[in-house]
């Protein structure tokens, strides 16, 4: 590799330029149009809620009368077309917010039904699917059931109807993204069909959507199509790469009030919680979010097209409708998977000199390798790739604050495959 451009073999770079040219014509314009629509929605909400400089100042102590905190909640409620929302830096992750929402509704003797197969790895211990962990829902008498997806990745409506007709279900859990699975992620229209089916069978069932990785990818959100509770992380899509921590819960007012009481305490709810100067970055992050999500999507489409052309199986394929920012690449080889993630790290602006290795990560069942040279630790809206070390050895790539950075990192990853003889080029 004598000739190179920014550390990329020139032959590989030229191949990437040809791939990119095709994508710009066929796919990038559509992504940008969706971003434009969502950007206007966000700006409209900020105008309607009268965002001002006074909103940027944080509070300390109990956080009484925090103007910015209250306005952020109302902005999220409008953007997600929900009755109410709670957005807090006190949520340490999306999993924390999901756990809060689950505990706010479920009581001993209730049944939680996942209709999208096994939930994401970090929720297994919270629910009590694997082992008797202190503080899990199972320990407090909440029963868990799951319906596996069909072979092609769709919802098994036949089994869903049978289950609800035979068993009293309190909450249906819907995971929008593929997580660590090999399936299509759910679109908002898929979620609408699912929620309508559940409500027709029993309108009292609470429908909760794990919306992580899906915000602003389409022109609507799950709360617009009947979801009672929608949950996501601020260090993913809606934080726009600016928010340093936090998460949101949006949905029906009664469930937001319950979630607020679970996060703080009954009688306190949303009225307290110091923001410590974070309001500005949460608002600014939301402002940037539609654009940043679009840049991330362009990177995912580029990765899909390039890796598929090089002979790898990818999901989604280049022409499939995107419903989240995740791009999965199947390697069927442990060492190739690790090399790819290490190549992504080499393309980072932060910690490019670090070589990620598989390790035992809190909340995960298998060892996980995580490539994430990010400005915010673990921010999945930034360029990153991670994978559980288990067959068929699939890497899950997401993020990219700019398309150019995503492109560079993906090319670094491909070059790592070539140099380690996992790919003939």
Image (cartoon, rainbow, N blue to C red):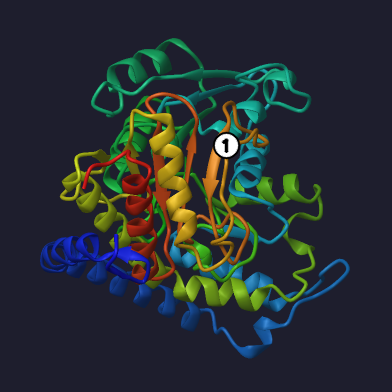
Question: Relative to residue 58, is residue 101 depicted above or below?
Answer: above
In the picture, measured across the screen, residue 34 lies left or right of residue 229, that is left
User: x, y percentage for residue 233?
Assistant: 56, 54
Question: Relative to residue 352, is residue 44 depicted above or below?
Answer: below
User: x, y percentage for residue 424?
Assistant: 23, 42
- Element type at marker 1? loop
**Which residue is labeled 1 in the image?**
358
Quarter-wise, where is residue 40 in the image?
A: bottom left
Q: Which sits in the foreground, 278 or 19? A: 19
Question: Relative to residue 179, is residue 256 depicted above or below?
Answer: below
Question: Relative to residue 146, is residue 219 depicted above or below?
Answer: below
The crowding category of the residue bearing disc 1, from other C-alpha atoms within 10 Å (few below 14, some 14 to 19, many at least 20), is: some
Does residue 177 appear in the picture of this structure? no
Identify the residue shown where x is 43% and y is 30%: 334
Quarter-wise, where is residue 358 in the image?
A: top right
User: x, y percentage for residue 65?
Assistant: 78, 74
In the picture, measured across the screen, residue 191 lies left or right of residue 390, that is left
Q: Which sits in the foreground, 200 or 234? A: 234
Q: Which sits in the foreground, 70 or 8? A: 8
Q: Residue furthest front?
A: 2
Total numbered labels placed on residues in the image = 1
Q: Which sits in the foreground, 106 or 418? A: 418
Instruction: Give the quadrant of the N terminus.
Output: bottom left
Identify the residue shown where x is 42% and y is 25%: 117
Q: Residue furthest right?
A: 61
Quarter-wise, where is residue 135 in the image?
A: top right
Does residue 91 appear in the picture of this structure? yes
User: x, y percentage for residue 133?
Assistant: 74, 22
Q: Residue furthest bottom?
A: 53
């Amino acid at each position: 590799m004598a000739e190179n451009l920014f550390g990329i073999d020139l032959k590989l770079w030229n191949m990437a330029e040809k791939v990119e040219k095709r994508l710009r014509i066929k796919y990038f314009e559509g992504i940008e149009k969706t971003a434009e629509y969502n950007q206007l929605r966000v700006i409209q909400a900020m105008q309607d809620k009268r965002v001002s400089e006074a909103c940027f100042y944080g509070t300390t102590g109990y956080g009484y009368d925090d103007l910015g905190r209250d306005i952020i909640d109302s902005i999220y409620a409008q953007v997600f077309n929900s009755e109410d929302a709670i957005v807090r830096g006190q949520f340490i992750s999306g999993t924390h917010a999901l756990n809060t929402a689950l505990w706010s509704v479920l009581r001993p003797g209730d049944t939680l039904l996942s209709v999208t197969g096994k939930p994401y790895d970090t929720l297994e211990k919270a629910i009590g699917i694997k082992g008797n962990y202190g503080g899990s829902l199972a320990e407090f008498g909440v029963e868990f059931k799951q319906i596996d997806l069909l072979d092609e990745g769709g919802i098994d409506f036949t089994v869903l109807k049978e289950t609800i007709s035979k068993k009293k279900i309190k909450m249906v859990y819907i995971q929008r993204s593929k997580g660590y699975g090999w399936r299509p992620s759910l679109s908002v229209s898929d979620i609408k069909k699912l929620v309508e089916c559940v409500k027709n069978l029993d309108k009292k069932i609470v429908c909760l959507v794990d919306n992580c990785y899906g915000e602003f990818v389409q022109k609507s959100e799950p709360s617009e199509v009947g979801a009672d509770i929608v949950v996501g992380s601020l260090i993913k899509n809606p934080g726009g790469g600016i928010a340093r921590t936090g998460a949101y819960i949006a949905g029906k007012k009664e469930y937001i009030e319950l979630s607020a009481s679970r996060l703080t305490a009954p009688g306190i709810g949303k009225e307290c919680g110091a923001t410590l100067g974070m309001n500005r970055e949460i608002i600014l992050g939301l402002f940037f979010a539609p654009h940043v999500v679009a840049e991330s999507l362009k990177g995912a489409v580029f990765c899909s097209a390039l890796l598929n052309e090089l002979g790898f199986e990818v999901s989604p394929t280049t022409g499939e409708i995107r419903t989240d920012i995740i791009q999965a690449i199947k390697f069927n080889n442990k060492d190739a998977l690790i090399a790819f993630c290490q190549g992504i790290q080499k393309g980072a602006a932060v910690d490019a000199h670090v070589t990620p290795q598989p390790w035992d990560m809190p909340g995960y069942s298998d060892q996980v390798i995580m490539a994430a040279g990010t400005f915010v630790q673990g921010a999945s809206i930034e360029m990153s790739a991670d994978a559980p070390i288990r067959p068929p050895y699939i890497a899950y790539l997401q993020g990219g604050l700019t398309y150019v950075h995503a492109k560079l990192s993906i090319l670094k990853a491909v070059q790592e495959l070539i140099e380690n003889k996992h790919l003939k080029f």
